[in-house]
Image (cartoon, rainbow, N blue to C red):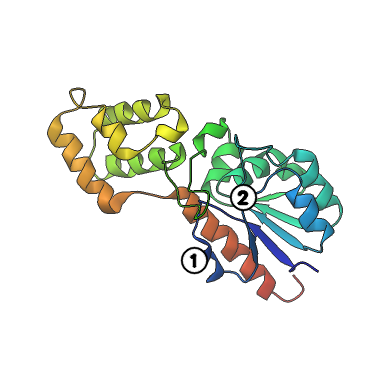
Amino acid sequence: MMQEIVVFLGPSLPVDTARGILDALYLPPARRGDLLLAGSQGAGTIVLIDGVFFQDCAVAHREVLAVIHEGVRVVGASSMGALRAAELDTLGMEGVGEVYRLYRDGVLTSDDEVALTFDPLTYAPLSEPLVNIRATIAVAEESGVLTRDDGACIFLEAQRRYFPDRRWEDILESLKGSIPHYVLERFRIFLISGVRDVKAEDAVLALTTVRNRVREPGS
């Protein structure tokens, strides 16, 4: 019999961090059929955070709806979960967090925004998802580290790259000559502590949301 709460998690948040928030069965990024299997083995709540995109068949809309039909609560956030929730929130899937809202409202439209490469053993991210790059640049602009023009230049350079090639140092290196050296150096210093990880923030929010509901009488 599977544990009541099942979480599909990979590069969005370290599993050790997640376990400190919510007691659950943690499984790797979901592939097609994984949610059906979890539902058939007794999961009452499924939290879909990470799923495969290009490496394998992605989680299908039909399987999400199938487990919901069987009475399973399905919560989505951060990455694949945010995408599916934005598409299926009117049909019973629950979306949580900023990435979900951005997709729901049509601000983001491409899977490419949350795609990244990661270590297949540790799930540690090896590239930066565009949604985090976008958010980090916004914070840098608000803080006066970047002008809007410089921020736009950096974002366009990141956006044009294939997702495995989105790494801060490579992006900034390619902009030498396009952005003044002192601006790039100031931004590099900012990145030491100023990177905003929206996907991690949303993963924490999703786990916290489920944990709090578990604690509510009659939930």
Quarter where residue 89 is shown: top right
Q: Which of 54 and 140 is in front in this view?
A: 54
Disc sitting over residue 17 in the figure: 1
Q: Which amino acid does label 2 sit on?
A: Pro
Instruction: Residue under label 2, please give it.
Output: 29
Q: Residue at x 68, y 45 (%)?
A: 31
Image x and y of residue 58, in percent:
68, 39
Question: Mark 2 to mark 1: distance in Å?
Answer: 16 Å
Q: In this view, does 110 lie to the left or right of 162?
A: right
Quarter where residue 208 is shown: bottom right
Instruction: Look at the image and tell me whether residue 144 can be seen.
Output: no
Image x and y of residue 109, in percent:
57, 30
Q: Which residue is drawn at 15% across and 29% down?
A: 180
Q: Which residue is drawn at 77% across and 57% down?
A: 38
Image x and y of residue 195, in percent:
34, 49
Quarter where residue 8 is shown: bottom right
Residue 219 vertical position relative to residue 75 in the rendered view, above or below: below
Q: What residue type is labelled 1?
A: Thr
Disc sitting over residue 201 in the figure: none
Q: Is mark 2 on a helix, strand or loop?
A: loop
Of badges 2 and 1, the one in the foreground is 2
Q: What element carries label 1?
A: helix
The quadrant of the image that shows the C terminus is bottom right
